[in-house]
Amino acid sequence: NRTFGLTLPLSFSSYYVRTTILDQSAGPLINGSTLSINQTWPQEPSGYNRTALVSVPNGAGPFPVVLMLHGSGGNSTGFINSLGNRLNSVIRIAPQGYGNQWNVDAEPNTDAPDVEFIRDLIALIKTHDNVNPLDISIYGSSNGSGLLNRLIIELDRGSFQKAAGSVSQMITKMHNGTNFRADPNQNNSYSQSVALPQGRKILSITGTSDPVIPYTGGSGVGTEFLDSQESIFRFAQGLGHTGPKLLDSEGTPGDGTNRPAPIVQYSYLNGQVIHYKVTGGTHSLAPYTADSHDLIANFLLSE
């Protein structure tokens, strides 16, 4: 076991995290195994084992990796196969949120240091010889997408290269209209202005009839959200887009072959940053769930 106090790039002066990586060995990641990282933080002063399930395809690799972040009330067991067999050619890692939630803003069950957990989990994953350390992606849904938005802002591009968020855009605390904001003290204050790490590919897909997280922004699940199209524009802007935000009417509907017409694409930076508006889509993206999952998987599997 390896135990260490973390030295973090942001100012964590009032929030100390202690991490122990448990029972890991050299060699390949094993299908069906569980990775463990023990964290100590104010909510768990005696330490708590954070876990992640592992699914590995047949073969020697090295394989791309997709981390799968479940939604509020979900769990790693249910979410690791949430895209069906679409990701069977890659290693899938499904971390478990503390109290079945991720610490983004106003979650009642958790104030866990989830950014540090995912950062250290990725570092651990990269030590295994059947992993391609240059092809790490993260997929998050709902509350998991909320955490993913934090990770896009707070983790360097070397940690992961592609991000696919489903049914949650940024909360207003993450961008103040001028700057991206990080939450170094883990108290949901998002008190530090930061530059967006460069080079990452980002996809966001949200539904216009979502009753949980409103497509056009505003109040939901105890916090305030940016408009979906504003959120993706700010990510594009942070990655170097210098033009205006695309108008709602400037999206490209599906042609019935690449995707159904009600799934409208907004693309920035030659496809580096993409938003899909699922017209009429609910929080599960119904009635276009399968089509949406195809788009997410295709993005995660892309070069």
Image: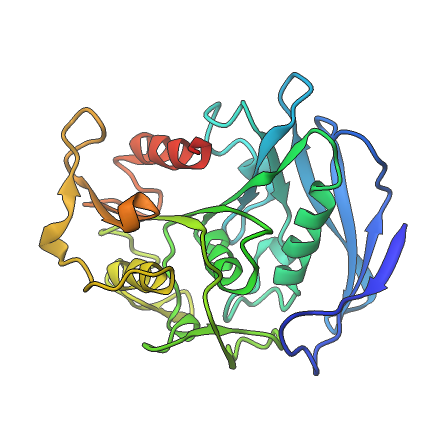
Whether residue 287 sits left or right of residue 137 in the image: it is left
In the rendered image, residue 76, in percent from the top left (x then y), is placed at 61, 41
In the rendered view, tell whether residue 211 sits above or below residue 80.
Answer: below
Whether residue 88 sits left or right of residue 248 in the image: it is right
Can you say which quadrant of the picture contains the C terminus? Answer: top left
In the rendered image, residue 10, in percent from the top left (x then y), is placed at 62, 74
Residue at far top of view:
59
Residue at far right of view:
1
| Residue drawn where x is 15% and y is 42% of the image | 252
Front residue of 103/239: it is 239
In the rendered image, residue 197, in percent from the top left (x then y), is placed at 49, 61
In the rendered view, tell whether residue 278 sits above or below residue 10.
Answer: above
Residue at far left of view:
249
In the rendered image, residue 264, in percent from the top left (x then y), is placed at 19, 43
Whether residue 1 sits left or right of residue 72 in the image: it is right
| Residue drawn where x is 28% and y is 45% of the image | 270
| Residue drawn where x is 17% and y is 34% of the image | 254
